[in-house]
């Protein structure tokens, strides 16, 4: 997949898509097309982001990709999602790249490349190897003395491998006399173990926060933490980026009738997230799936709070792991008379049997972001992937310039 992401189109640096779909978002002719919004124009030294209003999904081209190969638009405009444009325009940010270094781990190199190209920078040279017994070896191939270093590494599966790799990268930068080290963690693993719900449980989120801090990180940049309290587990500053605007921007580019739309929280704990999402979608009504969880990765849906009959339901969550919660919630929504069900989440963990559940026909479309890389074997016809590279790149610029990050989302 990495190779295809970096290949420019043969005739133009811009792909334009049009849609004749009658469905709310992408229509029934979604077929086997996987779309990733926002990619790299390698012909330009400064990467640019496609203006949201000009991105339309052309399902007529899906027949060219019968095996689920992705249609890949390129970047041709340096803008943030539409929901964030006004906030960005109000604050000038210096793009001085002096003493700024970006390095990528092995967990999500494609996203790291996108971030670097959005920022108009090159990824730093770093050697990451494995010894025969699995031990990780890291060596920086260039000087970082006195630099502000940003290490891009989600702790996605294999979580322990990627977490250890991040800590060793941090240690290498600290010992190479980097001035400041920021761990850019698009997906923060172990965040679900953020409290004690039963006796003799660990709070692994706090432990991992301590490990990253002790390794030498000065700051953390994370996307959509499972719960807000996880920020308090770090004894260093945490910049928490919300990726909802990227998904909202995609939905807003479609023909949405607010009278037909209802936003659904798959559990009570996600009500605040769903309410904020609904407010952006013309203050759409809200419904809540009440569930009873009997164990980790096991959920039983009991009832629905709210009305979804004859409506298009958009389920919003921070992550999809085994898809048990969201699949059972979707089945309940169909039982209650929902016309179509869409799933939206930031982190696509996709542990088995998630793909079988998501592609079983319960969902019209499953919309995710690329905080976690999705392997080609996990593509399925209803899947849509949106990039968060522009959002993370802009945030890194603001951190480097000592500018406000929260103002992006206000």
Image (cartoon, helix red, strand yellow):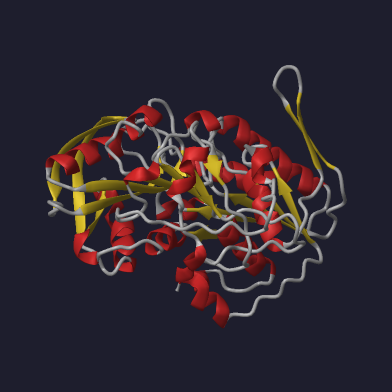
The percent coordinates of residue 297 (x first, y second) are 34, 30
Relative to 318, is 97 above or below?
Answer: below
Instruction: Give the residue furthest to the top.
Output: 133
Tell me where residue 197 appears, x and y as whole percent.
31, 38
Q: Position of residue 205 (x, y in %)?
A: 48, 42
| Residue 362 vertical position relative to residue 47 in the rendered view, above or below | above
| In this view, 294 is above or below 205 | above
Image quadrant containing the C terminus: bottom left
Q: Closest to the observer: 119 or 213?
A: 119
In depth, the one of 348 and 312 nearer the eye is: 312
Q: Where is residue 145 shown, x and y percent of the image? A: 85, 56
Q: Which quadrant of the structure image shows residue 125?
A: top right
The answer to whether residue 52 of the structure is visible from this angle is yes
Q: Residue at x 15, y 52 (%)?
A: 308
Question: Which residue is located at x 72 percent, y 71 percent?
Answer: 95
Whether residue 235 appears in this view of the structure is no
Count of numbered labels shown in the rendering: 0
Q: Is residue 356 left or right of residue 110?
A: left
The image quadrant that residue 136 belongs to is top right
Position of the N terminus by quadrant: top right
* Left or right, residue 184 beside residue 207: right
Q: Nearer the viewer, residue 351 or 187?
A: 351
Q: Is residue 359 left or right of residue 67?
A: left
Taking the view exactly as shown, the residue that stands out farthest to the bottom is 90
55 or 99: nearer the eye?
Answer: 55
Q: Is residue 127 left or right of residue 346?
A: right
Give the answer, above or below, for where 20 lies relative to 171: below
């Amino acid at each position: 997949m990495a190779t295809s992401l970096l290949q420019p189109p043969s005739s133009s640096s811009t792909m334009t898509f049009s849609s004749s779909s009658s469905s709310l978002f992408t229509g029934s002719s979604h077929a086997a097309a996987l779309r990733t919004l926002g990619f790299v124009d390698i012909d330009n030294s400064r990467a640019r982001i496609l203006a949201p209003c000009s991105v339309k999904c052309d399902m007529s081209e899906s027949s060219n990709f019968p095996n689920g190969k992705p249609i890949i638009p390129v970047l041709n405009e340096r803008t943030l999602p539409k929901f964030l444009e006004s906030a960005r325009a109000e604050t000038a940010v210096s793009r001085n790249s002096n003493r700024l270094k970006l390095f990528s781990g092995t967990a999500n190199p494609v996203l790291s490349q996108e971030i670097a190209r959005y920022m108009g920078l090159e990824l730093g040279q770093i050697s990451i190897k494995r010894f025969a017994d699995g031990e990780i070896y890291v060596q920086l191939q260039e000087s970082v003395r006195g630099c502000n270093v940003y290490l891009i590494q989600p702790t996605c599966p294999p979580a322990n491998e990627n977490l250890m790799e991040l800590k060793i990268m941090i240690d290498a930068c600290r010992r190479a006399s980097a001035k400041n080290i920021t761990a850019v963690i698009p997906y923060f693993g172990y965040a679900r173990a953020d409290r004690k719900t039963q006796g003799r449980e660990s709070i692994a989120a706090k432990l991992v926060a301590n490990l990253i801090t002790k390794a030498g990180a000065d700051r953390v940049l994370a996307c959509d933490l499972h719960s807000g309290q996880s920020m308090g587990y770090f004894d260093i500053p945490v910049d928490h980026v919300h990726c909802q605007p990227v998904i909202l921007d995609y939905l807003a580019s479609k023909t949405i009738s607010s009278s037909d739309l209802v936003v659904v929280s798959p559990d009570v704990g996600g009500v605040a997230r769903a309410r904020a999402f609904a407010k952006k979608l013309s203050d759409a009504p809200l419904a809540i799936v009440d569930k009873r969880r009997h164990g980790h990765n096991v959920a039983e849906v009991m009832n629905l709070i709210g009305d979804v009959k004859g409506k298009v339901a958009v389920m919003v969550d921070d992550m999809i792991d085994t898809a048990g919660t969201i699949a059972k919630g979707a089945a309940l929504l169909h039982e209650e008379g929902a016309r179509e069900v869409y799933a939206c989440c930031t982190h696509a963990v996709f542990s088995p049997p998630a793909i079988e559940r998501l592609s079983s026909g319960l969902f019209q479309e499953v919309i995710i972001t690329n905080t976690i890389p999705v392997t080609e074997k996990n593509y399925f016809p209803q899947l849509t992937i949106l990039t968060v590279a522009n959002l993370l790149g802009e945030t890194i610029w603001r951190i480097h310039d000592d500018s406000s990050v929260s103002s992006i989302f206000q």
